[in-house]
Image (spheres, rainbow, N blue to C red):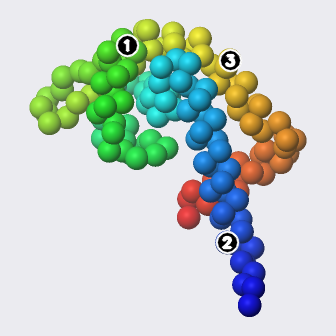
């Protein structure tokens, strides 16, 4: 007997396949800068925060696993893109974007935007907006 998956199951499988494809393509894109999409995400989080934030807060805002945030920050700090700052609590490491990190984001932004446009080129603007809203609802649930 053939079991037909529900539309919800089919949609979930497609979403996972698209996500996997995007992660692989993204890793390939970011490898040219000797980093992963997770490294770049840390830079974007710091840029968006506008002020130093803790490694644990970076982890909460990450797109994927929080467990490797210290290693991600280590790599970015070695490259001069971020710096760790001391704060009153020795258990907390604050991380700030350096001028070099801000410059790096500015230089790479056109390529990142191009990648996003390339990824979404099969959907028109209204479809992209609809997808954005639907994915937001899934994330909020």
Q: Position of residue 131 (x, y in %)?
A: 74, 51
Query: In the displayed structure, would residue 132 be above or below residue 25?
Result: below
Residue at 61 percent of width and 26 percent of height:
29
Residue farthest along the bottom direction in this orientation: 1
Q: Which residue is label 1 attached to?
A: 79
Q: Position of residue 102 (x, y in %)?
A: 48, 14
Quadrant position of the N terminus in the picture: bottom right
Which of pointers 2 and 3 lies earlier in the amino acid sequence? 2
Residue farthest along the front direction in this orientation: 1
Which of pointers 1 and 3 lies earlier in the amino acid sequence? 1
Q: CA distance from mark 2 to mark 3?
A: 36 Å
Does dot 2 land on a helix, a strand or a loop?
helix
Q: Which residue is label 3 attached to?
A: 110
Q: Position of residue 58 (x, y in %)?
A: 37, 37
Q: CA distance from mark 1 to mark 3?
A: 21 Å
Q: CA distance from mark 2 to mark 1?
A: 43 Å
Residue at 47 percent of width and 24 percent of height:
35
Which of pointers 2 and 1 lies earlier in the amino acid sequence? 2
Quarter of the image for residue 72 reads top left
Callout 1: few (<14), some (14-19), or many (20+) C-alpha neighbours within 10 Å?
Answer: few
Nearer to me, 70 or 99: 70
Q: Which residue is label 2 attached to?
A: 9
Query: In the displayed structure, would residue 28 be above or below residue 129?
Result: above
Residue at 53 percent of width and 24 percent of height:
31
């Amino acid at each position: 007997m053939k079991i037909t998956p529900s539309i919800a199951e089919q949609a979930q499988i497609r979403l996972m396949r698209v996500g996997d494809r995007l992660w692989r393509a993204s890793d390939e894109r970011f490898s040219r800068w000797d980093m992963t999409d997770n490294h770049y995400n840390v830079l974007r989080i710091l840029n968006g925060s506008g002020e130093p934030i803790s490694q644990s807060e970076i982890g909460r805002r990450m797109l994927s696993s929080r467990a490797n945030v210290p290693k991600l920050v280590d790599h970015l700090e070695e490259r001069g893109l971020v710096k760790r700052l001391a704060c009153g609590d020795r258990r907390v490491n604050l991380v700030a974007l350096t001028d070099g990190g801000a410059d790096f984001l500015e230089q790479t932004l056109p390529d990142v935007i191009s990648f996003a446009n390339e990824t979404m080129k099969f959907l028109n603007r209204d479809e992209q907006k609809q997808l954005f809203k639907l994915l937001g609802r899934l994330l909020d649930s």
